Image (tube, rainbow, N blue to C red):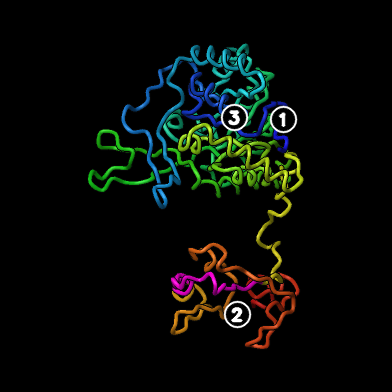
Amino acid sequence: MADLSSNFIGIKSPNPFWLASAPPTDKEYNVRRAFDAGWGGVVWKTLGSEGPPIVNVSGPRYGAIWGADRRLLGLNNIELITDRPLQVNLDEIRRVKKDYPDRAMIISLMVPCDEESWKDILHRIEDTGADGVELNFGCPHGMAERGMGSAVGQVPEYIEMVTAWVKHYSKMPCIVKLTPNVTSILPPAMAAKRGGADAVSLINTIKSVTNVDLDHFSPFPMIDGQGSHGGYCGPAVKPIALNMVGEIARHAETRGLPISGIGGVTTWRDAAEFLAMGAGNVQVCTAAMTYGFKIVQEMISGLSQYLDEKNMALKDLTGRAVPNFVEWQDLNLNYVTKAVINQDDCIKCGRCYAACEDTSHQAIAMSEDRTFTVKDDECVACNLCVNVCPVDNCITMKTLPLGAMDERTGRPVAPYANWQTHPNNPMSQAAE
């Protein structure tokens, strides 16, 4: 099996799979079970200063979005940072790290936005043996209303200031956890880099309301007839997370900044995609909460097998897709594909026809015996038919060579030399 040992900003672990700061990493019992199951590291659930006590709700803490067969697609939580005493957490961290010296142990921190509070908590954690700290600038609920969490993460100046305090008062590697609840992820990432962050992690949860109880007319989870926004995570947020990770990995001012990828990692393939988009490792939460800690074993074996089949080392996968992540105007508009329906696999359900006829380009014909065929002269290769077809690989896209002629119209299917002259480009003379 491929060697999955990881060295992320100097923090070594037997594999790149870490548990994210969340309920699964709240106490010694859980973390020991996680390490025994095979996780390479954990980010301990966020610790706060010994100020006003953290009091969580005693009613439901989670809302959910399900797919077919109640597959959990997204989880909304309104849980706060740890409500256990700071010293209890620190004692447990020290014991676990001593017994699992080869595993990464990161402490997530969130305290009021003043220098003394950060100086104090950094002093408190110095002798735990932890490998690094993660600054929680992302939590969108509960703590943000107190001027912490995403309230800090949405202000680049605060990110830079607090990160600089942490680097001044601690020699531990510092990871800054970024909130997705911003217009652009780049200013916060650049601020973290200016402050001296050794890495960033993203994404934290997305501010959300997953559903509304239509009998009591309250957002869910509902506490005594009322609800509040929470943080959304799980497989549904993966596309948002991948984009933000890629944005940081490719941008000139943040390129080279190590990234810990978070957001919907459920399988080895998800992890590989994050790594290819520039992440140095991945953090997981919802998948563990859904399937248990042993899911990491499938991630380890799957990623190892993939790397073996590709004859690739783990370090070679990181950032592999970044050069191909470009702006729209850099795409090759001479590249043309057309849909093809495999008649042997077609079950004649008609989804492709209905979708294309009603909502797209009327490029699929239906015969009296319900045989569906593609009209190449009308097909714009939008891929909608592929996505709505319930049979895997029944509809595929064939690539046409540059200058290929349409048999029905006798016209070239890709007549444009470059995108600047394409009529879909509003700046081109052809469009005028």
Name the residue at 67% across, 88% down.
410
How far from the left and from the top, in percent, is residue 264?
53, 43
How far from the left and from the top, in percent, is residue 260?
63, 36
Q: Is residue 83 left or right of residue 116?
A: left
CA separation in Å, label 2 and label 1: 51 Å
Q: Which residue is mark 2?
A: 376
* The disc label shown at residue 7, or none: 1
204 vs 137, nearest the viewer: 204
How many numbered marks are there? 3
**Residue 341 is a magenta residue:** yes
Marked residue nearer the N-terminal end (3 or 1): 1
Helix, strand or loop at mark 2: loop
**Residue 244 is a magenta residue:** no
Name the residue at 48% across, 33% down.
292
Magenta range: 337-355
Helix, strand or loop at mark 1: strand
How far from the left and from the top, in percent, is residue 88?
48, 13
Q: Residues within 10 Å of mark 2 (few under 14, many from 20)?
A: some
Name the residue at 68% across, 79% down.
413
